[in-house]
Image (cartoon, coloured by chain):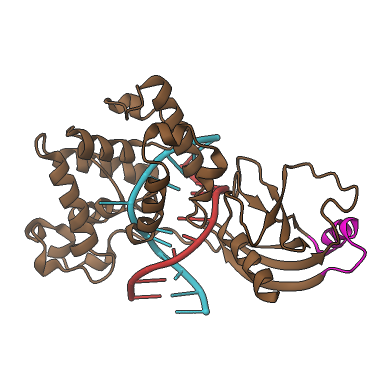
Chain colours: A brown, B red, C cyan
DNA sequence: AACCCGTGGGT
DNA sequence: TACCCAAGGGT
């Protein structure tokens, strides 16, 4: 959950997740829709599917435990070097270096590392620096301290260098260039895509389709989406003789593009009204008694728009 | 190597 | 507002 997601955002999700899945076995035995349900709104949904798959692997291959070696940990889907090393140092007392966003920032300033910290070459350099610093004893304490130094002192903006325990040999601080490091990501403007979404409503239910496991919103349930308004109208006519009416429109921004969403409301008299054959699994989502499935934040917003309109 | 994958906090 | 980026990993 913490991958590319702030701690404060994760905490409520973590609490609910651990209440529902209190062990690796509980998670491994769960239905994927149940897992994605508790991930609704958190983003990067492949993490949920990877975690579920990893639980199954641990159940069958590692006696329902997190593996003891770095090599075995790295075989789990969704577990890379940073996550594996964090777990192994904190939970099992192993001596391994870590490299999260906070550590990257500390190291990039301390050694004045040129190059964006996300590039392959720079990450390689940062790992080398982390390896060189990491002690062979009390590693968990050190790693936690290094991350906390990054989050509380060596902040992204206005770092508290006067409170920093390693300011004495911080290259950026010595030259007064703290604000120049880490080097910002090369900026590319995000493309804008447009889509038209059909909210097919029958009483208290709305038609949702399950998205394929890979790609945007993988495995989640979303209303039918179309690139053009014409496609939407042609689709809507299969369900209802009454015309689709505008519901709401807004911009949803992903990590790599903007999506301008135009939502339309199509009221139908009965479920499966026409002879529509959907290529994907379908679900009539009940607004009053919601099913336990995964929804994207944008889908929740669309469902909310219908509820308010009632 | 470059791109894909979400959403929200902070400025 | 617009922008950067967050306890990264997969392809």
Please give left or right for residue A240 compared with residue A224 in the image: right
Is residue A238 rendered magenta in the image?
yes
User: Is residue A77 visible from the viewing direction of this image?
Assistant: no
Position above or below: A115 against A22: below
- The residue at 47%/43% (across/down) is A47
State the image coordinates of residue A242 (x, y, percent, origin top left). 90, 68
Query: Which quarter of the picture shows residue A152?
Result: bottom left
State the image coordinates of residue A238 (x, y, percent, origin top left). 90, 55
- The residue at 57%/50% (across/down) is A294
Position above or below: A295 against A75: below
Please give left or right for residue A282 compared with residue A244 in the image: left
- The residue at 16%/39% (across/down) is A132
Query: Which quarter of the picture shows residue A159?
Result: bottom left
Query: Of A12 and A175, which appears nearest the observer?
Result: A12
**Which image quarter is the C terminus of chain A in?**
bottom right
Position above or below: A43 against A268: above
Please give left or right for residue A49 compared with residue A281 in the image: left
**Magenta: main secondary structure:** helix
* Highlighted range, magenta: A228-244
Please give left or right for residue A306 compared with residue A102 in the image: right
Query: Of A83 and A175, which appears nearest the observer?
Result: A83
- The residue at 32%/25% (across/down) is A71
State the image coordinates of residue A224 (x, y, percent, origin top left). 74, 55
Query: Of A198 and A117, which appears nearest the observer?
Result: A198
State the image coordinates of residue A137 (x, y, percent, origin top left). 9, 36
Is residue A97 rendered magenta in the image?
no
């Amino acid at each position: 959950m913490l991958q590319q997601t702030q701690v404060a955002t994760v905490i409520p999700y973590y609490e609910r997740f651990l209440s529902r899945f209190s062990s690796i076995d509980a998670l491994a035995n769960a239905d994927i829709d149940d897992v994605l349900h508790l991930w609704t709104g958190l983003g990067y949904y492949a993490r949920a599917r990877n975690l579920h798959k990893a639980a199954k692997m641990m159940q069958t291959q590692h006696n329902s435990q997190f593996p003891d070696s770095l090599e075995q940990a790295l075989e789990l889907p969704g577990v890379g070097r940073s996550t594996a090393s964090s777990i192994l140092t904190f939970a099992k007392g192993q001596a391994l270096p870590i490299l999260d966003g906070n550590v990257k920032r500390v190291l990039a300033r301390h050694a004045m590392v040129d190059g964006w910290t996300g590039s392959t070459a720079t990450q390689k350099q940062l790992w080398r620096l982390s390896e060189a610093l990491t002690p062979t004893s009390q590693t968990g304490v050190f790693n936690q301290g290094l991350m906390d130094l990054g989050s509380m002192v060596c902040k992204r903006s206005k770092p508290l260098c006067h409170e920093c325990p390693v300011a004495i040999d911080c290259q950026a601080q010595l030259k007064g260039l703290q604000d120049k490091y880490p080097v910002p990501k090369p900026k590319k403007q995000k493309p804008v895509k447009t889509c038209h979404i059909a909210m097919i409503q029958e009483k208290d239910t709305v038609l949702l389709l399950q998205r394929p496991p890979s790609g945007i919103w993988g495995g989640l349930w979303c209303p039918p989406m179309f690139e053009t308004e014409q496609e939407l109208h042609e689709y809507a006519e299969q369900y209802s003789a009454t015309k689709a009416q505008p519901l709401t429109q807004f911009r949803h921004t992903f990590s790599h593009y903007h999506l301008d969403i135009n939502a339309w409301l199509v009221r139908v008299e009965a479920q499966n009204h026409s002879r529509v054959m959907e290529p994907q699994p379908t679900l009539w989502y009940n607004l009053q008694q919601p099913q336990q499935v995964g929804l994207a934040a944008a889908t929740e917003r669309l469902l909310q728009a219908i509820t308010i309109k009632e």
